Image (cartoon, rainbow, N blue to C red):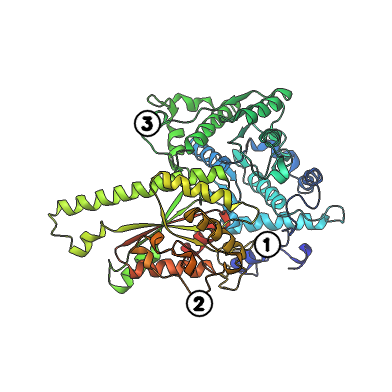
Amino acid sequence: MGSAGAFQGYSYDVPLSSSYEIAMQALSSLISRRKRGEGPKDVQKLERMHKYTKILGLEEHISGLKIIHVAGTKGKGSTCSFSEAILRECGFKTGLFTSPHLVDVRERYRIDGLDIAQDIFLTYFWSCWNQLKEKVTEDLPMPPLFQFLTLLAFKIFISEKVDVAIIEVGLGGRLDSTNVIKEPIVCGIASLGMDHMEILGNTLGEIASEKAGIFKPKVPAFTVPQLPEAMDALKAVASELEVPLQVASPLGPDKLGGLKLGLAGDHQIINAGLAVALCRSWLHSTGHTSIFQKVNRETELPEAFLQGLSTAALSGRAQVVHDTWVKSCRSAEGKEHSSGDLVFYLDGAHSPESMEVCARWFADAVKEESRSSFKGKAEEHQKCGGICLGSENYDGFKKSSKQILLFNCMDVRDPQILLPQLFNTCAASGVHFSKALFVPSLSSYHKVDSPTSAVATDSKKDLSWQYTIQRTWEKIIHGKDVIAEENSKLNSSESMPTFDFVHDDSSLKCNPLCKQFACSAVLPSLPLTMKWLRDCVKENPSVRLQVLVTGSLHLVGDVLKLLRR
């Protein structure tokens, strides 16, 4: 990749798309191949972060952003999205910084609810890049990727003169790059759990103390109901800093006046409750109390709050996407009902807690879709007396739904914890997977791609980790180890699974002794997997495949990228 100094910046002679690709190459050069916990100590990295803000002339302006700063193990992205939508509906110009991105790095920067435009992004990107490059020394090298992206967020929001900046913490809190914020208006701590223990500590109390590191003296802070160990740690830090810490109540249906939250899942009532508390506090602290004069009497919330809560969006979290490729193929062939349906349920859950939440959401969602689909088409059939719908159309609402798991996780995660949580939670709701597919992610952890980057079709990746995950899944299904280590690599790119599972109970066809694993398969690449799923519904008009994509935000992003194409 070339050194960070090898990139010459923005040129108006270069097409916008080419300049963007060059910027992505520059960003990729900032990615360290060290594992977390290696390299410069986080204390030193935070000290450098302060130096970078001075070089860019941002230090004095950051406090003027009127910031909402949010940390947490899970739910912090949702909380930030709810908060941004609420304050935008209140009439403020909003800036939202979240991570990670799924398809395009510009997703991390939203102005008034929209990803920042490419040309505007490039202007600020090269401005920061060139200023920092001029000051690089042996003692102060170019910042690593997340630090640069955080600096860019401050640059964008200050330059665009947003009224409020909602900033999501990257990792932890106390030593996170975003913690150069000295005077936020209000801080929030979403739900806490055991994650990133190699960095944050081995107990829930230690992790909570690190997250509470974003608290600032006497600045209001809110959290959600936490386990006692976590709550005690938060209260201890708050007491030391004289922070008025309050617990935000979950936002029950009675507070929504019949509206649905924009983000799906029962757990979102917790994040929505925290967002409401943060926005109330922000409005009071900044002197915008007139908004509370227009309160919905039924819910006791301002109408703007209700509108924001119902329209908030966050890609890759409890997101349902119907594959339009299948529909376009039907139209192209002139056979409007010549294939089945393919629906993707995307959730980047990668911790035990979030996996349980994901499984509950998926189980509820597929059952709800089945009910609403059947009801809608049955009513349509009844209205026209069964005449206007041909027999082929009528059979459409009797489609057989099959649930498919499309899974991958990073090797720092433990599939022996994640997969049983997923399997058991779904099974308890009566949802069982007809097939589990394990596939490597498409994107590289060491490269920042653009949405137009070429899709790698190399099917010669090392699949040993995916076979390890498959062994875990098969053990869950059969109650014992059924794949010997030396004979685990049962699939090859030349041998794709059959579609027999759509007609029969796959578990009845499993015969581990004969190497017949009808319940699962390792596939060599994501593009091949997508083709296999589409071929399946194309060849089986009476089938609806409901595909849960989870275990990794990288995998979710890769699927979204392929679907958008």
Q: Which amino acid does label 3 sit on?
A: Gly
Q: Name the residue under label 2.
A: 494
What percent of the width, then of the height, locates residue 534? 40, 67
Q: How far apart are marks 2 and 3 (CA)?
A: 55 Å
Is residue 113 visible in the rendered structure shown here?
no
Amino acid type of disc 2? Glu
First in sequence: mark 2 vs mark 3: 3
User: How far across and down, in percent of the image, does residue 89 sit?
Assistant: 47, 38
Please tell me which of labels 3 and 1 falls first in the chain. 3
Label 3: how many Cα within 10 Å (few below 14, some 14–19, many 20+): some
Amino acid tagged 1: His
- Distance CA(mark 1)–CA(mark 2): 29 Å
Q: Which of 96 and 360 is in front in this view?
A: 360
Q: Name the residue under label 3.
A: 257
Residue at image mark 1: 446
- Kindly give the residue lying farthest to the front in the view shown: 513
Residue 184 sits in quarter: top right
Which of the two marks, 2 or 3, is nearer to us in this view? 2
Q: Characterize the local packing of mark 1: few (<14), some (14-19) or many (20 or more) Cα atoms within 10 angstroms.
A: few
